[in-house]
Amino acid sequence: MMSFARKLHDLRIAQKRSLQDVGDAVGVSKAHVWNLEKGTTANPSMELVLKLAEYFRVRVADLVGDSPDTGDESPEMIAMFRDLKQLDERDRETIRLLMDSMKKSRDKRD
């Protein structure tokens, strides 16, 4: 199983982010991100792990290595759902209406 440090490093490189980019986005120094990637900071706070997961748009479970079965959902879809849960009811209703409209348009094309 891949370590948190390795996953963090691989995500940062894959998304072409600098240590400074990540640090600025989650409110820590680039040195702290470096230490997390090297495994010298062994136990990041849950708040920091949540911020990192949100920043990289992955599930916390994907980042820390304890990934329960979520079917065929991509990490991006899980992140979108997490974002949706943070919206108020009025905004969620707007998104529901937009999705209905998009489905109707798709059905007409098909």
Image (cartoon, grey):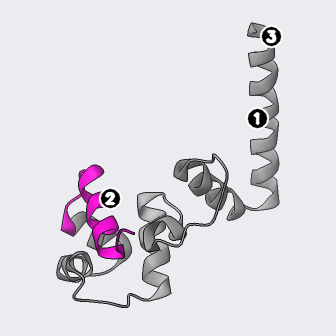
Quadrant holding the N terminus: bottom left
Q: CA distance from mark 1 to mark 3?
A: 14 Å
Residue kind at label 2, given as amino acid type: Leu
Which residues are the magenta region?
Answer: 1-19
Quadrant holding the C terminus: top right
Tell me the SS state at disc 3.
helix
Q: Which mark is residue 99?
A: 1
Residue sitting at x 82%, y 48% = 93
Q: For this rendering, which residue is in front, 109 or 41?
A: 41
Q: Which residue is mark 3?
A: 108
Q: For this rendering, which residue is in front, 60 or 1?
A: 1
Q: Which mark is residue 11?
A: 2
Q: Is residue 80 above or below residue 53?
A: above
Residue sitting at x 66%, y 57% = 70
Tell me the SS state at disc 2.
helix
Residue sitting at x 34%, y 66% = 7
